[in-house]
Image (cartoon, rainbow, N blue to C red):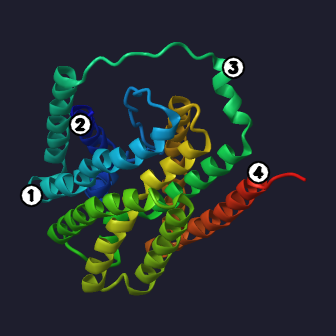
Amino acid sequence: MKRILYVLSLGIFGIATTEFGIIGILPQIAMHFVSCRHFCIPSTGRYPCPPRPVRCPPHSLRKLSVSSSPALRSPACWESPLITWMAGLFGWQASFGLCALFNGAALLGLWAWLPSLPVDGRVSYGDTARILRKPRLWWRLALACLMISAMYASYSYVAAYLGEVTRAKGAQISGLFLLFGIAGVGGNWLAGRMLSRSIPGTTLAFIGLLLLCHLFVFFAGGHLAVMTVMIFVRGFIHTGGFLISNINVSSAAPESPEFVNSLFTSCGNLAVTIGSTHGGLTIAHAGIHQLVLTSVGLLFLSAVVWGASEKASMKLLKPSH
């Protein structure tokens, strides 16, 4: 199992480099292509490649997810800092070469070391689709969508925010991304520990802390020293978001982990698209300083949906008389 986790960590590092590495260098790319009058930012969201599922008993699924997800996501905390650092040294074109190098290494590693996994029987589509009748699953999907949208409404444009509002320079932005990544490793670990104790409590803490972080950035984002501290705090909180969202969704239908995992992946794609689109519209119509308020609004909605989800779950668990 450890070997599989290490191999998947390598694969996710390569995938995440393509997914998120561009975030730190968007301003440089924009400056280049706007001058050519044909720059656009695609809004197709993330394209994660979910690992081939390992069949495990439902009672151990939550434990496996909580213990392995931080290990899998931790390498992904470093891709934006490394790509941004390379762009600062040699230009944004060189950073794409680094992306290609990472992906090539990931491809060779997966080809050489990923073992062939057995398939335990066949599951009918009808049995799998029955979980779509569970209201709890839809509440959790809506919650995950709003949480991830809130994360990426501002994170998608964090390099531009640091440049225009905080007035940070290229090398400083690279350093701040690196700080974000370092904090994210610890945040993933803590999120996993907290989820093993209480999923609802961890979810509410994530929403509340990330909301407070955005409000603080809104009022003090123009000061580099303050933003340095907030970038560290934001990285610590932010990187646990996917793990917390994933566990919320998977715990709603533990009897069909593979199908739920595919639903969560699609939900994540949609959420990043919604978040980045709303963030872009906010910048276009209200200015980049108002960007964080988009995330604040989405986090308020997340808190409302969390409350409704917990209330619905309590009604289902309440014995009928």
Residue with the mark numbered 4: 316
**Which of label 1 and label 3 is nearer to you?**
3
Give percent across and percent down for residue 208.
52, 73
* Circle nearer the N terminus (2, 3): 2
> In what quadrant of the picture does the N terminus appear?
top left
Above-or-below relation of 100 to 123:
below
Q: CA distance from mark 2 to mark 3?
A: 34 Å
Q: Nearer the viewer, residue 81 or 201?
A: 201
Residue designated by label 3: 126
- Residue 254 quadrant: top right
Inspect the image, locate mark 3, and give the three-letter code of the amino acid beneath it.
Answer: Gly
Q: Which residue is mark 1?
A: 89
Helix, strand or loop at disc 3?
helix
Residue occupying the point 18% across, 71% down: 172
Q: CB of mark 2 within 8 Å of CB of mark 3?
A: no
* Residue 36 visible in image: no
Residue type at mark 1?
Answer: Leu
Q: Are marks 1 and 3 in contact (CB under 8 Å)?
A: no
Q: Position of residue 187 (x, y in %)?
A: 33, 63
Residue plotted at (59% across, 33% down): 255
Three-letter residue code for mark 4: Leu
Nearest to the eye among marks 1 and 4: give it: 4
- The percent coordinates of residue 160 (x first, y second) are 34, 66
